[in-house]
Image (spheres, rainbow, N blue to C red):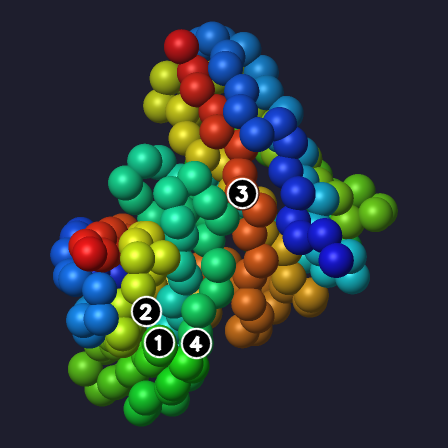
Amino acid sequence: DAGVTQSPTHLIKTRGQHVTLRCSPISGHKSVSWYQQVLGQGPQFIFQYYEKEERGRGNFPDRFSARQFPNYSSELNVNALLLGDSALYLCASSLEGQGFEKLFFGSGTQLSVL
Amino acid sequence: GQSLEQPSEVTAVEGAIVQINCTYQTSGFYGLSWYQQHDGGAPTFLSYNALDGLEETGRFSSFLSRSDSYGYLLLQELQMKDSASYFCAVRDPQAAGNKLTFGGGTRVLVKP
């Protein structure tokens, strides 16, 4: 079975641009979460979606938005990119998205903002 | 809020035992998870402790003391492939869903 897939794997943008990152969860998983990981730090929670509804939002500005589609795939959008947005963006899926669940992570999208 | 502290780096030789400590300060607590991440790779789940005590999974074990707000991951019979970063994480009980707060990670370097 395929794991969590993310695209693209690498992306280079300039300040002020917009970016869309995509994630396909493991088949049967209904919850998708997004995390930002700056080099040398732990992942930081951005969003969680379950059944197309936003279930949680981390401490990120409104430039960050996301959505989940009927097939449970998800997009993360970042507007007006800043240099500080350079990071690895990880998508994680789980079955129901609540309580204790193992998170299954994709390998991420490495975003560089120049 | 939630905060977790773990050492930034540990170096050991093949065959040795490494203990990675994690102390946490949380407004509520359900359990402590551990994830492994190789350079350039995805974090992968290792273990979860909700109750006090030791959980063993092969060469890896995880321990929790809720009264001390402390846990550790024990890596035994170290192999070169264990060189990776290890993160402890807690679920935020005040958040809906299963939001995890991660520690800063411990980089384990295994030498021959």
CA separation in Å, label 2 and label 1: 28 Å
Q: Amino acid at mark 4?
A: Tyr
Q: Position of residue A25 (x, y in %)?
A: 70, 50
Farthest-out residue, right: A70
Image quarter in which the N terminus of chain A is found: bottom right
Q: Chain of mark 2?
A: B
Q: Chain of mark 3?
A: A
Q: Secondary structure at mark 4?
A: strand
The residue under label 1 is: B60
| Mark in front: 3 vs 1 | 1
The residue under label 4 is: B48
Determine crowd level at label 4: few under 14, some 14-19, many 20+ residues with C-alpha closer than 10 A.
Answer: many
Residue A111 lies left or right of residue B64; in this view the side is right
Which one is nearer the viewer's eye here, B36 or B16?
Answer: B16
Which one is nearer the viewer's eye here, B4 or B10?
Answer: B10
Q: Amino acid at mark 1?
A: Phe
- Whether labels 2 and 1 belong to a single chain: the reply is yes
Q: Position of residue A107 (x, y in %)?
A: 54, 43
The residue under label 3 is: A107
Q: Which mark is residue B27?
A: 2
Q: Secondary structure at mark 2?
A: loop
Q: Looking at the picture, does residue A83 appear above or below residue B40?
A: above
Residue at image position (36%, 57%) is B81
| Mark in front: 1 vs 4 | 1
Residue A101 lies left or right of residue B34; in this view the side is right
Q: Amino acid at mark 3?
A: Ser
CA separation in Å, label 1 and label 4: 12 Å
